[in-house]
Image (cartoon, coloured by chain):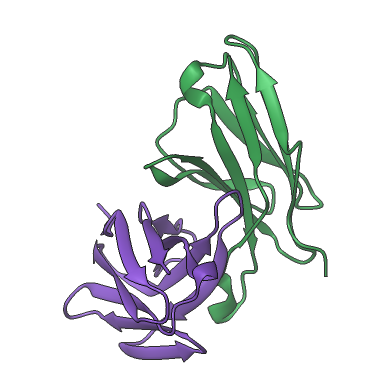
Chain colours: A green, B purple
């Protein structure tokens, strides 16, 4: 079974631009979460989608948005990029049945650099 | 609110045993999970405690005490490849709630 995939793996943008990142979850997983990871800050939760609906949202400005498609694939968008948005963006998927719903499977991440 | 506290760094010697602690403040949760992340890699699931006590998976064990709001990850027979960051995470009681991660503990292993 294929793992979580994220595209692109690396991205360089300049301040003020916008960016769209893509995530394909493991087949059969309906929940997709996005995290921002920066040195010393751990995994900062951005949002979670389930069945095309945003279920939870972290404490990030409205420049950060996302969506999920009917095939569970998800995208996140960051508009008006700032230098502080440089980070590793991780996507994770999980099943929703019983104990298994606690385990998240992470993709390799997209390394975003804002210049 | 919900928060998780972990030491930022821990150093141990190859072949030894190390314990990484996680204390939490949260109102009701289903269980405590642990993830490992190597430099440049993605976090990978290590273990999960739904009940108090010890869960063992090979060289790794995880412990939970709800009465003490405390858990730990125990790594035995340390190998150089265990050098990584380790995150604890709280699984909420409500499946509609998000998983909360600690800031991670960087484990340094000396030869």
Q: Position of residue A28 (x, y in %)?
A: 77, 67
Q: Hey, which residue is sitting farthest top in the picture?
A: A16
Q: Taking the image as drawn, is residue A108 in sight? A: yes
Quarter of the image where the C terminus of chain B is located = bottom left
Q: Position of residue A82 (x, y in %)?
A: 51, 16
Front residue of B41/B107: it is: B107
Where is residue A84? Give x, y as percent. Answer: 46, 22
Residue name at image x 51 percent, y 88 percent: B57
Q: Quadrant of residue B75?
A: bottom left
**Residue at image point 55% right, 58% down:** B38
- Say if A90 sits above or below B71 in the image: above
Task: Indicate whether A16 appears above or below A22.
Answer: above
Q: Residue furthest front?
A: B111
* Residue B65 or residue B57, whichever sits in front: B57
Q: Is residue A20 left or right of residue A56?
A: right
- Occupied quadrant, residue B12: bottom left
Q: Is residue A32 visible?
A: no
Residue A64 in the figure: left or right of residue A110: left
Q: Quadrant of residue B93?
A: bottom left
Q: Nearer the viewer, residue A45 or A40?
A: A40
In the picture as drawn, the residue positioned furthest to the left comes out as: B68
**Residue depicted at 29% across the width and 75% down the height:** B71
Q: Position of residue A83 (x, y in %)?
A: 50, 17
**Could you tell me which residue is drawn at 40 percent across and 56 percent down?**
B101
């Amino acid at each position: 079974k294929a793992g979580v995939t994220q595209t692109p793996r690396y991205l360089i943008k300049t301040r003020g631009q916008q960016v769209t990142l893509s995530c394909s979850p493991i087949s059969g997983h309906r929940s997709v979460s996005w995290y921002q990871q920066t040195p010393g800050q751990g995994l900062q939760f951005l949002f979670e989608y389930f069945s095309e609906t945003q279920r939870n949202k972290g404490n990030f400005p409205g420049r950060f948005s996302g969506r999920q498609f009917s095939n569970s694939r998800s995208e996140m968008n960051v508009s008006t990029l700032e230098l502080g948005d440089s980070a590793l963006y991780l996507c994770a998927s999980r099943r929703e049945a019983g104990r298994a719903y606690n385990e998240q499977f992470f993709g390799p991440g997209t390394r975003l650099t804002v210049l | 609110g919900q928060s998780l506290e972990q030491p930022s760094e821990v150093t141990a010697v190859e072949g030894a045993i190390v314990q990484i602690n996680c204390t939490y403040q949260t109102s009701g949760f289903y269980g405590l999970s642990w993830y490992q992340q190597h430099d440049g890699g993605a976090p990978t699931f290590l273990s999960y405690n739904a009940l108090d006590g010890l869960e063992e998976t090979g060289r790794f064990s995880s412990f939970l005490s709800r009465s003490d709001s405390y858990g730990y990850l125990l790594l035995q027979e340390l190998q150089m490849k265990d050098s990584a960051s380790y995150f604890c995470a709280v699984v909420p009681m409500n499946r509609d709630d998000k998983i909360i991660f600690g800031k991670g503990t960087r484990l340094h292993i000396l030869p």
